[in-house]
Image (tube, grey):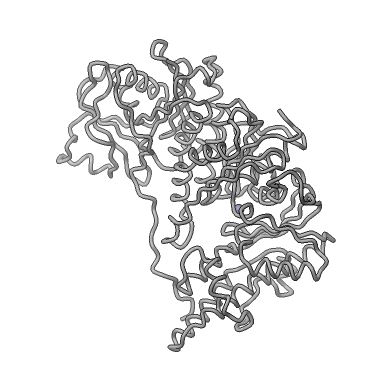
């Protein structure tokens, strides 16, 4: 089953994957300011390199974050609209799950906390207890938003768990999490961006006086 | 690609309307708009993050609705067109990312176009093949909305558009919103000011016309300014309140509106005269204002200028005007944009295609 995977929750990453063949093509850029510019070219390059037609895909994997708003949205919009255009299902995956899966696959065992930058001196985190029998990370609870100091507080539930700070998300790993989840009939994430923050808006208290 | 009457889907996300339009040449097939305006009402203005979130939610439903209304399949399209600026950058990026993905998924060319020039392109669209005379060049275009107030000289829609002037502070639509708040009227302010102004005397209070003094007309002949007008209204309202008097809301609304309409049309008609162009085109959401249209008709008649006002549904931000501009570029033989373009919140009006 060939999938196109797109993630812009950190930098921009696009991949074409297959359960048996693994990551067939992947493009990544860590710059967090160029999502809208490069996501389109990356999709095209990956499909060409993998020699895959949109019609030959089984679905489009979208990384739902958590991630800072502006960038995260570009990838989700691209994944949703590509899926619509190609007439394929959208497969939502939580981006942190891809990071955790990569670490377990590279040999990590036991508990793990994945941490990514949420800007404004805050971080996103997800806690995983272990990898299950098929290697998928077992997330305990939803991703969260916190100040870094909160995670260092010994009273925090996962304070003693090993922690990895990730600056990038691999769409290849995101796609393979989707492949495994599908192959083993695991549920996908909800098709909703994980902003984990309200839009910043302050209600004004009416017009300010102009005359003294 | 069909270059005589291309089937184009346009995506517009520069402000608070998610617009998807489908045209075949100059024939309008669908103009689907999902607006997040109601979500901004309690804040008294467009909140960029709320607008951008709404675009992400509305894109797929709006594309589906437009395709159904147009009675086409996405595969039938000749090209995709998308607004890449000017506008709110976070909002623009949603449309830009989506449009590129759609173009690659369908293997269709993409045209990244200028929002302001799109407003002019709206005038070319007809529900049925050609019933009215086509837009003639050159024309002066006055574009007025909550996001922009611009005066353009359009010599050719796809190759020669010049910015003559624009607002140096608030957009006219913003001024309507701010004055509505001063008068405790809800958002958006334009229709509210229009409503209460019906009973008012437009000559009751002489509010200032921004950048209309001789020295301003030298340096800012075609530019606009509405912040002084807004302050003047605020001062008037405060004086009445401080004196314990009732604020004559209808007169304030009518007089304020008159000041805005007066300066907009004075400068537009000056431009027509300066360039010897007897044509004026209006565009943008503020064109919904009844007084603006009435005064525009009076003054252009008196000056012997042909006035064009596209249907209101095509004056507010929409995807059909973007599709129309894309179709014009294709019909004129222009090559598609490359996939690397980004969102440019300050894209100059002279850059018609990126
Ligand atoms: Zn506009």
The C terminus of chain B lies in quadrant: top right
In this view, B104 is above or below B44: above
Residue A62 location, x and y as percent?
Answer: 42, 30
Q: Which picture quadrant has residue B208?
A: bottom right
Q: Residue at x 50, y 26 (%)?
A: A87
Q: Which residue is drawn at 60% across and 25% down?
A: B107
Residue positioned most to the left: A155
Residue positioned most to the right: B276
Residue B333 location, x and y as percent?
Answer: 77, 34
Between A83 and A148, which is closer to the camera in this rendering? A83
Q: Which picture quadrant has residue B206?
A: bottom right
In this view, B48 is above or below B30: below
Residue B293 location, x and y as percent?
Answer: 68, 66
Is B85 situated left or right of A198 in this image? right
Is A24 situated left or right of A203 in this image? right
The N terminus of chain B lies in quadrant: top right
Is B100 situated left or right of A1 in this image? right
Is B85 situated left or right of A80 in this image? right
Instruction: Please count the marks in the image.
Output: 0
Residue A67 location, x and y as percent?
Answer: 38, 38
């Amino acid at each position: 089953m060939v999938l196109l995977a797109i993630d812009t929750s950190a930098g921009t990453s696009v991949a074409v994957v297959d359960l048996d063949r693994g990551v067939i093509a992947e493009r990544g850029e860590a710059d967090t300011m160029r999502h809208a510019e490069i996501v389109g070219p990356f999709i095209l390059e990956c499909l060409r390199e993998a020699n895959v037609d949109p019609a030959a895909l089984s679905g489009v994997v979208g990384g739902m974050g958590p991630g800072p708003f502006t960038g995260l949205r570009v990838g989700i919009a691209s994944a949703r609209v590509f899926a619509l255009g190609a007439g394929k299902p959208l497969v939502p995956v939580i981006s942190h799950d891809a990071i955790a899966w990569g670490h377990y696959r590279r040999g990590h065992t036991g508990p793990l906390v994945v941490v990514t930058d949420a800007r404004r001196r805050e971080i996103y985190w997800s806690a995983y207890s272990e990898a299950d029998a098929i290697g998928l990370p077992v997330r305990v609870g939803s991703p969260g938003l916190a100040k870094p100091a909160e995670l260092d507080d010994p009273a925090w539930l996962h304070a003693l768990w090993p922690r990895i700070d990730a600056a990038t998300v691999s769409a290849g790993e995101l796609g393979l999490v989707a492949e495994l989840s599908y192959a083993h009939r695991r549920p996908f994430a909800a098709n909703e961006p994980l902003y984990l923050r309200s839009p910043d808006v302050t209600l004004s208290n009416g017009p300010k006086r102009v005359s003294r | 690609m069909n270059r005589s009457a291309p089937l184009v889907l346009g995506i517009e996300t520069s402000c608070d309307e998610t617009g998807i339009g489908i045209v075949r040449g100059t024939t309008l097939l669908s103009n689907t708009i999902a607006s997040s305006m109601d979500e901004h009402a309690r804040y008294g203005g467009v909140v960029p993050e709320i607008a951008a979130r709404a675009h992400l939610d509305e894109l797929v439903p709006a594309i589906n609705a437009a395709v159904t209304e147009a009675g086409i399949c996405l595969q039938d399209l000749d090209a995709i067109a998308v607004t890449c600026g000017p506008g709110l950058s976070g909002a623009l990026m949603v449309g830009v990312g989506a449009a590129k993905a759609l173009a690659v998924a369908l293997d269709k060319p993409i045209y990244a176009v200028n929002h302001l020039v799109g407003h002019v392109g709206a005038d070319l669209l007809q529900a049925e093949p050609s019933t009215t005379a086509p837009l003639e060049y050159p024309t002066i275009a006055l574009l007025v909305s909550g996001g922009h107030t611009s005066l353009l000289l359009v010599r050719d829609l796809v190759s020669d558009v010049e910015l003559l002037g624009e607002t140096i502070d608030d957009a006219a639509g913003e001024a309507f919103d701010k004055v509505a708040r001063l008068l405790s009227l809800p958002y958006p302010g334009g229709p509210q000011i229009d409503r209460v102004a019906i009973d008012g005397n437009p000559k009751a209070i002489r509010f200032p016309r921004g950048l209309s003094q001789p020295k301003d007309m030298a340096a800012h002949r075609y530019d606009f300014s509405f912040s002084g007008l807004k302050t003047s209204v605020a001062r008037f309202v405060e004086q009445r309140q401080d004196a314990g008097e009732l604020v004559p809301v209808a007169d304030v609304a009518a007089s304020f509106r008159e000041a805005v309409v007066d300066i907009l049309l004075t400068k537009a008609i000056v431009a027509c005269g300066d360039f010897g162009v007897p044509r004026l085109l209006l565009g943008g959401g503020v064109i919904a204002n009844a007084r603006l249209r009435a005064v525009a008709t009076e003054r252009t008649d008196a000056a012997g200028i042909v006035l064009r006002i596209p249907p209101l549904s095509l004056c507010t931000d929409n995807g059909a005007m973007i599709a129309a501009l894309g179709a014009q570029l294709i019909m004129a033989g222009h090559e598609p944009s490359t996939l690397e373009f980004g969102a440019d919140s300050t894209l100059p009006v002279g850059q018609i295609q990126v």
